[in-house]
Image (cartoon, rainbow, N blue to C red):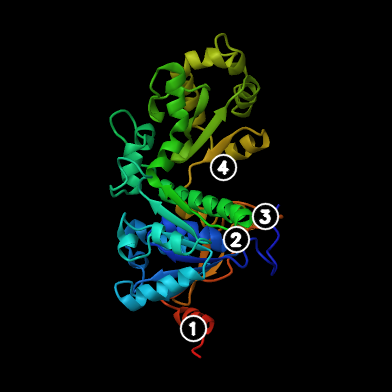
Amino acid sequence: MPATPAPARRLPLDGVRVIEFTHMVMGPTCGMILADLGAEVIKVEPPGGDKTRKLPGLGIGFFRSFNRNKKSIVLDLQTPEGRATAKELVAGADVMIENFRPGLMESLGLGERALCAEFPHLIHVAHKGFLPGPYEDRLALDEVVQMMGGLAYMTGPEGRPLRAGTSVNDIMGGMFGAIGVLAALVERQRTGRGQPIQSALYENCVFLAAQHMQQFLMTGQPAPPMPSRVSAWSVYDVFTLAGGEQLFIAAVSDRQWVTLCEVIGHPGLAHEEGLRTNAERVAVRPQLLARLGAILAGHDASELAAKLDAAQLPFAPIRRPDQLVSDPHLIESGGLVPMGTEDGGETRAVLLPLLMNGQRPGVQRPIPAIGEHTGEVLAGLAARRPRAA
């Protein structure tokens, strides 16, 4: 059932001001989540704008994907005036977000230790490659930590580590930063004090691999990469159908196995000797998958998908991201919506994957142009300064 369009209403973080010094993906994701939830997020960009705006190739969608609902101002932090203005902004904020290389914000006088000491109410969020420890001064990228943190090993086949096809650690690192902010805001209501928060790519990736680490601790056996895994289920794979179309199909119980055999027109297969239980089928999985593959090669993908859906069997078409922009569920459920762009045009935005009181946190502001709100924000600062006697 489609989510109800969001009427004008107070959002959970209305009244919370966030100053964001970020680029690329991790820090901007944190700021976008807070902005979607109603915070006033002021993105501080250098002269000429955040370089993420101009990334080519696979980075071309970064800025628009993670910077909606924000205001943009331009400050030159390489000048004393720019740094003084940035500090004045932080003084009047609830939250500050940054994700630059270790030591950079400290060199500008905007580091965690100095700011938290001067502004005890401040929640200071640093998104880094590594939490404090032997690796903390290393530079990190999503690809770096996927290799270090077990994810690339588990994703690719033996001897061919393969990074995930999107910026999983950058995005999740921003999510954990936002979770920390929400917890710190609640704690500040009790104590009156803010606190420093750190989120890191490496530790995020290790958290993703935690189940495989625990498997080793319980069994003493290293987990094999996913392409080499021993499946717990006999039918849990991608099959090629007529015309080269592909479907992922699963049968994770004996009842589902019987149903699947009926759907594909081979009910007797379910009752053959050695194929009646999942354990028996797993023992002959390669041969079974070959038989199923030969049967399914003659099926039309769309017709079979309809039958699998009607039978309530797990299945999925193999879709590319470009195909998702016309996905009926995303559109009709309100998860893919129009959004204004920095050049005055329009695109579509993927909203946060949650409902709050039956509604999706939506688009309140288009993508800002470079420095679009500089005058507004600086005028607000000037109005709050004490007047000379």
- Of callouts 2 and 1, which one flags the residue occurring earlier in the amino acid sequence? 2
- Cα–Cα gap, marks 4 and 1: 62 Å
- Cα–Cα gap, marks 3 and 4: 34 Å
- Of callouts 2 and 4, which one flags the residue occurring earlier in the amino acid sequence? 2
SS category of the residue bearing label 4: helix
Instruction: Return the residue nearer the eye: 74 or 122.
Output: 122
Query: Residue 343 is drawn in which quadrant?
Result: bottom left
In this orientation, does residue 37 appear?
Answer: yes
At 48% from the left and 52% from the top, the residue drawn is 177
Instruction: Return the residue nearer the eye: 322 or 19.
Output: 19
Q: Which residue is mark 2?
A: 37
Which of label 3 and label 1 is nearer to you? 1
Instruction: In the displayed orientation, state which residue is furthest to the top.
Output: 273
- Cα–Cα gap, marks 3 and 1: 37 Å
- Cα–Cα gap, marks 2 and 4: 38 Å
* Other-residue count near label 4 (Cα within 10 Å), few / some / many at <14 / 14–19 / ≥20: few
Q: Name the side, left or right, on which 365 lies relative to 214.
A: right
- Of callouts 3 and 4, which one flags the residue occurring earlier in the amino acid sequence? 4
* Other-residue count near label 3 (Cα within 10 Å), few / some / many at <14 / 14–19 / ≥20: few
Instruction: In the displayed orientation, state which residue is furthest to the bottom.
Output: 389
How many numbered circles does the render carry?
Answer: 4
- Contact (Cβ within 8 Å) of mark 3 with mark 1: no
Under mark 1, the amino acid is Ala
Under mark 4, the amino acid is Ser
Q: Which mark is residue 302?
A: 4
- Contact (Cβ within 8 Å) of mark 2 with mark 3: no
At 49% from the left and 89% from the top, the residue drawn is 388
Q: Which residue is mark 1?
A: 382
Q: Which residue is mark 3?
A: 356
133 versus 45 height, above or below: above
